[in-house]
Each structure stands twice: as structure tokens, then as C-alpha cells.
Image (cartoon, grey):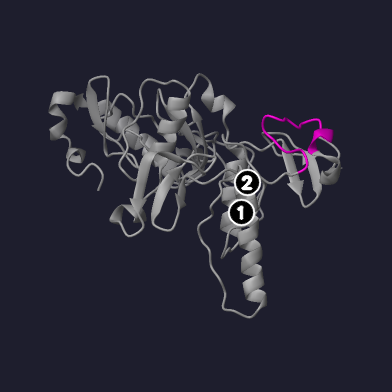
Amino acid sequence: MEGDDCSIGLPGAPLPNSICGDGLYCSLKNGNYFPTCEPMLETSECFRMRREFDNNLGKGSIGHLQQAPLCDGDGDFSPLICIPGQTCFCVNKRGERIFGDGLYRKNIHQIMQCECSRLNDKLKELVEQSFPFFSTRCQSDGSFDPVQCFGDLCVCVDERSGSPTSDTKNLTVGLSELPCYDEKIHHDEFNYARPCENIKLGLINMIFEVEREGFIDVEVLVDICDLDGSYAPVQKNDLSLFCADKNGERIEEFSVSKDSPDADSMNCKCARARKLLTDNNYLEIPECCSNGNYKKLACRRGFCFCVDEDGKQVSVEVIDIHKTKLPCSENECN
């Protein structure tokens, strides 16, 4: 517990025989001769933000949909952030949004752990890349796809840990030979790659061919596919950028010209959330900018408040007739 004596260990000294527990670390504070268990406020951004949230909550300056940061025992951000009544999405250990989302529902923090998304995020840190590459395939909620294929060899894996749960099978005999094969998820038993992944593979092969012929290095920094093999939210054609669903089809009218200032910041997070909620018959649907991003001002059930680029509430709410008093009411989409 906080303030308990602990042992930090010294060279040549016996190993520490006591630990502090989650959210605490052993520290020798100024003026003390013996180390004690102290909160991770100095070393953990998550716990620092949690303390700030608690302080603001005590002052009455937290909105009704704002959620306290969730931290794990090491002081890192827990894998999930939710917008109550709408969606939840995956974050890495630093609290940055990564691939994976789903509908907000009961026990979502136990159900959705984003293990595959976090593994891929870690891989990006370790591997220098100049063009998109293939890695472990995830499901839309950030868990592992139960079928993983590497070349022509395929195997079943645990959706949470990614550990193999079956013998390997050759793709030429068909994915249906695997006990984890699901025709609703894996539509073609003789082709593991999905339509977007086939296009991506062609792009990668083209890059290798160009470099093999002695041309200068080619860099393609934007991946057209998501980690589940579907199309990424932002797609483009000759004239414009547009928000796409997982099948690559444009979502409503969310599109901007390539030379528009709104193209540079386009993320389609709002458009994708709107699509997910609409398809599942939710009644409270977010309003988006023309480029598919969240408007900075959101209103629900007669109250309005400011939100960030992920749609999270970041201010106290006011009744809708007073929404112009909020700093985000001006230039909602700039």
C-alpha cells in the first residue's frame, strides 16, 4: 500500500523481498533513509492523468460522459477507451489510438483486450518500414484472427494470446480443414488474402520490381488496408479522398478534394463510428465534418460539449441553447 516500507535492492545486497502493488513503485524520497511505496505519478503519464481527472472531478469540472483514464499495474494505459453509449476503441500502452473498435456494451473491458492490435503496434516500433508489409492479422475488435497463414502454411491460434491451437495445414487443401475455420469470417477457403490485401500484395510486388530494375528507392507510407485485411478508413481516387467502409465503399458523402486543406487531417473516425452505429440501429449518431472527422462540438439529449478527434468529451456540458458559450462552437471543423 502507499507509504509502506519496501526494498529497492542494492548491488551485492539481498534481493528485494517486498513489492508495492499495482500503481505504486518503491522510491527513496528526499530526506528519508528507507524507501517507501509511492504512486507512479512521476513515472506514469496514465496515473498522472488519473490524478488530474480525480482533482477536476472534485472541482465539478468533469463532463458526464468523460471517463477516468484506466491504468494497468505497470502504469501503462489499459487497452480500451470508450465513449459511453456509442463505441470503444483500442489504444497502445501510451494511450494512443490504434486499430480496433467495437460497440459500447456491458463488460466490454473484459471482452475486448486488443491483444493483436497492440502486438502490431509494438512491431511497428521495432521494424523500420518504407512501405506497407504483412503482419499478424487481427479481427475488427483488435483480437487475433483465429486463422493465421504464413505463405501456404496456416494454423489456428487463440484469439486472445495468438498462441497456436492446432497443427498447420497447407492452404492448397483448403482452410476448411482447420477446426477454427469460419465461413462467415473466411469467405474463400482456398485464398486467405482478402480483396484489399490482394491489391496491397500487388503494390508491394511492384515496389520490389521497380527497385530490382535499379530505380531509386520507393516509399509508400500509407497502407490501404487495415489489420483485419479490410480497406482502411481513408481511401483515394484520382480527384479526391473519401471515407470508406471495410469493403472499400464510400460512406455517405464524406469526401474532399485532394488539394483541400481538410484532406491533410482527414481520418474518417467519425464516419466509421457513424457507419457502425447506424448498421446496428443505434439512435444516437455522431455528426461529422465533410471529411468524416468528428466535429469539435457534439450534442446529445439536449446537452452540448466539446470533443477531441476520437469523439471523447473533453469539456463540461451546457444545455444546447447555451452551446455558443463553449470554445469549440466556433470553427467546428477546422
Q: Residue at x 16, y 30 (%)?
A: 323
In this rendering, does residue 268 appear at all? Answer: yes
Q: Position of residue 30 (x, y in %)?
A: 40, 49
Q: Is residue 187 magenta?
A: yes
Alpha-carbon neighbours of circle 2 within 10 Å: few (<14), some, or many (≥20)?
some
Q: Is residue 296 above or below residue 216?
A: above
Q: Do tag 2 and tag 1 residues touch (Cβ < 8 Å)?
A: yes
Question: Residue 199's mark?
Answer: 1
In this rendering, does residue 10 appear at all? Answer: no
- What type is the residue that disc 2 sits on? Pro
Q: Is residue 320 above or below residue 16?
A: above
On the picture, is 82 further left or further right than 126?
left
Q: Position of residue 208 (x, y in %)?
A: 65, 69
Q: Residue at x 23, y 28 (%)?
A: 304
The kind of secondary structure the magenta stretch mainly shows is loop
Q: Position of residue 274 (x, y in %)?
A: 40, 32
Q: Is residue 270 magenta?
A: no
Where are the magenta residues, as a range? 175-190
Alpha-carbon neighbours of circle 1 within 10 Å: few (<14), some, or many (≥20)?
some
Determine whether the residue tagged by mark 2 lies in a helix, strand or loop: helix
* Residue, disc 2: 195
On the picture, is 254 further left or further right than 146?
left
